[in-house]
Structures are given as structure tokens and as C-alpha cells.
């Protein structure tokens, strides 16, 4: 029904953002809410809407390509919206496309809610349907050995991992590494955590 919404971000939570569009606040579930910033700047979020007996839900994406990959993942038997978002939260769309194209089941099983059978189904259903996805650059992140004791940005990133479905033990494991980083933004912490979890 909707292709995109233009508005300004008024709230960011670990599982969603609220986009104000002409005085109406849209709650939009996104893979990484901390990519966005609260402010008056007008932005465009591409959206996918699902309607069930109990809810109408919007899922948001920073690009049309990301939305299209989400919709391809949703078409796979056994993949729900939460699992598809968890896969996209990695931020490296090309790594996901490459894993599917190269039958890399072990890469796909590192995401929450994706077992071996589901990963094989993703490969089977999508292997020949991703040719139109062009390479997407990967962000390189700074590293440091500085220890940060009280870091709300790190806390938000860890909460976002839980919202994506990662188990407490996995969150605790990456926390040990991330706590040694300097005060980074929540987005960078989350990106680093997702890369650690998918190694």
C-alpha cells in the first residue's frame, strides 16, 4: 500500500522509530533504529506494511534496495518479519546476497531465529533471484582499547540486539568486546556487535 513516507524522526527506541508526517506519528519497526537521528530534518523511509487480524505493522528501510531484500526474505517459507529484520540489521546487504548466492548456510544460521533448515530454504528460494542486487559498500569502523564504564549508547545497542532476537548469552559475549571500545554512537556499537555475532 505504501512505498515510502517523508517526515522527521521524533523518537528512537531499540526496535522502532517514530516518524512524524504532517502531525501524524508513524511507529515503524526498523532493523537498526540507531541509524536514524531525532531532529527536524526531513527524511524518507521506505516502508512495507503487514496487516493481520490483530495488528497493522509498518517496517521501515533506509533504501528501496533494502526494502526489496526484506520482501524477498519474507517470501521464504519459515521467515517472518522479525527474522528478516534481524538479517538486515547486519547492515552489509552484499554479504547477505553473497551468502545466499554461494550457498553459505553457516553464515545465515548466525542470525537469530534462523536454523540450518531455514537457511537452506533461503538459499533454495532466493539463490537465482538476487542477480539485480548491486554491490553495497561496507562501513569500516574505528577500533580502540579504551575501556568505557558507563555508556548509555552501548546499553541501547545491547537492548537493540535483544529486540532483534539475539539470546542473552550472545549479547553478553559481544558486550565483553564492546565495553573495551571508546564512547561510540549507538549505531556504531550495534554495527560492531552484529559483525561480531556473524563472524
Image (tube, helix red, strand yellow):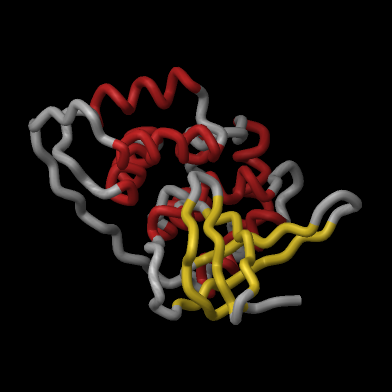
Q: Along the horizontal axis of the image, is 98 left or right of 146?
A: right
Q: Position of residue 190 (x, y in %)?
A: 35, 43
Residue placed most toward the observer, 4 or 113: 4
Q: Position of residue 104 (x, y in %)?
A: 48, 42
Kindly identify the residue that appears in the image at 48 percent across and 64 percent down. Answer: 10
Q: Is residue 195 above or below residue 52?
A: above
Q: Is residue 110 above or below residue 5?
A: above
Residue 138 visible: yes
Q: Is residue 12 above or below residue 42?
A: above
Quadrant showing the N terminus? bottom right
Kindly identify the residue that appears in the image at 36 percent across and 34 percent down. Answer: 155
Q: Position of residue 67 (x, y in %)?
A: 57, 67
Q: Along the horizontal axis of the image, is 109 left or right of 183?
A: right
Q: Is residue 66 above or below residue 33?
A: below
User: Hey, which residue is sitting farthest top in the picture?
Assistant: 169
Q: How many marks?
A: 0
Kindly identify the residue that appears in the image at 53 percent across and 58 percent down. Answer: 17
User: Hey, which residue is sitting farthest front in the picture?
Assistant: 23
Residue placed most toward the observer, 64 or 176: 176
Res 120 → quadrant: top right
Amino acid at each position: 500500500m505504501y512505498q515510502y513516507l517523508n517526515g522527521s524522526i521524533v523518537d528512537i527506541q531499540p526496535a522502532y522509530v517514530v516518524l512524524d508526517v504532517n502531525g501524524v506519528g508513524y511507529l515503524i519497526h526498523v532493523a537498526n533504529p540507531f541509524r536514524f537521528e531525532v531532529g527536524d530534518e526531513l527524511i524518507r523511509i521506505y516502508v512495507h506494511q503487514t496487516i493481520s487480524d490483530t495488528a497493522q505493522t509498518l517496517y521501515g528501510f533506509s533504501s528501496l534496495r533494502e526494502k526489496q531484500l526484506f520482501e524477498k526474505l519474507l517470501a521464504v517459507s519459515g521467515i517472518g518479519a522479525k527474522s528478516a529484520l534481524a538479517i538486515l540489521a547486519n547492515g552489509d546487504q552484499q554479504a547477505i546476497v553473497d551468502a545466499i548466492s554461494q550457498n553459505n548456510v553457516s553464515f545465515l544460521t548466525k542470525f537469530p531465529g534462523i536454523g540450518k533448515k531455514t537457511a537452506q530454504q533461503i538459499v533454495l528460494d532466493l539463490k537465482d533471484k538476487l542477480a539485480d542486487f548491486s554491490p553495497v559498500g561496507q562501513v569500516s569502523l574505528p577500533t580502540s582499547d579504551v575501556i568505557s564504564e558507563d555508556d548509555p549508547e552501548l546499553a541501547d545497542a545491547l537492548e537493540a540486539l535483544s529486540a532483534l532476537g539475539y539470546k542473552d548469552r550472545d549479547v553478553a559475549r559481544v558486550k565483553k568486546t564492546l565495553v573495551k571500545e571508546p564512547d561510540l554512537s549507538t549505531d556504531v556499537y550495534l554495527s560492531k556487535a552484529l559483525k561480531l555475532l556473524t563472524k
